[in-house]
Amino acid sequence: MILAIETSCDDTSAALVSANGELYSSVVSSQHDVHKKYEGVVPELASRRHCEVITVIIREALEQAELDWTDVDAVAATQGPGLIGSLLVGLAAGKALSLRFDLPLIPVHHIEAHAYSAELEYELKYPYVTLVASGGHTIIFLVRSSRDYEVLGQTRDDAAGEAYDKVAKLLALGYPGGPAIEKSARDGDPQAISFPRPTLTGSKRWNWRIEDFDFSFSGLKTAVYYHLNENPDATRADVAASFQRSVNDCLVHKTVEAARKYDVPRITLGGGVAANSALQESFRQRAENFDLEIFVPSLQFCTDNAAMIGYRAGQLNKTADLDLNADPNLPLNPLS
């Protein structure tokens, strides 16, 4: 049994996961109330809140699973990437528990965990292509096995989730930006404004040409900024819907093209942006044209959570010494 801890950003989470991936409990404490008035995550406040609640969250995870420390065989914690202060809190907690109860410590890469998170709920066959889209990362993976993956493309600047937060701020929709824009977009016309599709060439939808599988959303954010400056009376719902469609078109088109290029019949999604219902529907509609299967984790496993950390730890079973340090820029390292 693995006790997993996740504190890479602004959610404090703990979970109990068996070595074969069975989930016994998952507890997440959100910090939206802390950061909402700042319209973005304040790193110092995030790390302080982690310190305040982490022991309570770990205790709740044990109680929810109806287990005690004699049932725990290992401790897993996110090593990176993320906010350094937040990472240090979770990793320090993991080290303390490892030392106190003489348990192996398993460090986990946060983005790797997102890439494999759909396996918590689906029995997936390898290979598959996965899109991880979150506040800090937008990456397409080719996943060949539990220990072998390849990064096909990633964001060159703003990640999709970061662009959502910045555009939501421009529209005065509040924080977090993803759910706020999705809610506003339901009342808007996604074809009202012709925002660009960065890194896609051509004007006919779904016939775009691509040079690679990288993403870029900084220019799209800037296009929204200039549109609002030039059209101060623009309907916010139309702007939100048009922006959302532009982001989703980029994500869907490149991910589907990656699956086609590598002749992979399955696509999975991960990360907070994957919770966007319009994105999920666009993926499903586009996948039907190519007989692709789409697997989307439930909301609790799209956003940051310790369940995916525990699951990934069970796949790797790679222990570390207590001198291990957090790394906010931890690189991906396929174990082929």
Image (spheres, helix red, strand yellow):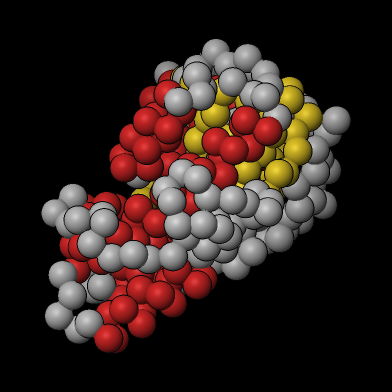
Of 200 and 90, nearer the camera is: 200
| In the image: residue 237, left or right of residue 40 | left
Of 250 and 108, nearer the camera is: 250
The answer, for residue 139, to whether it is visible in the render is yes
Q: How many marks?
A: 0
The answer, for residue 306, to whether it is visible in the render is no
| In the image: residue 211, left or right of residue 256 | right
Tell me the residue at 26%/55% (across/down).
190
Q: Quadrant of the N terminus?
A: top right
User: Residue 192: where, in percent of width, then height?
Assistant: 23, 62
Of 215 and 205, nearer the camera is: 205
Tell me the residue at 28%/65% (across/down).
193
Quarter occupied by residue 59 = top left
Tell me the residue at 27%/80% (across/down).
228
| In the image: residue 45, left or right of residue 188 | right
User: Residue 169: where, in percent of width, then height?
Assistant: 32, 73
| In the image: residue 138, left or right of residue 149 | left
35 shown above or below 131: below
Tell me the residue at 25%/73% (across/down).
171
User: Residue 56: where, in percent of width, then height?
Assistant: 42, 44
User: Residue 109: where, in percent of width, then height?
Assistant: 68, 44
Q: Quadrant of the C terminus?
A: top right
Of 96 and 234, nearer the camera is: 234
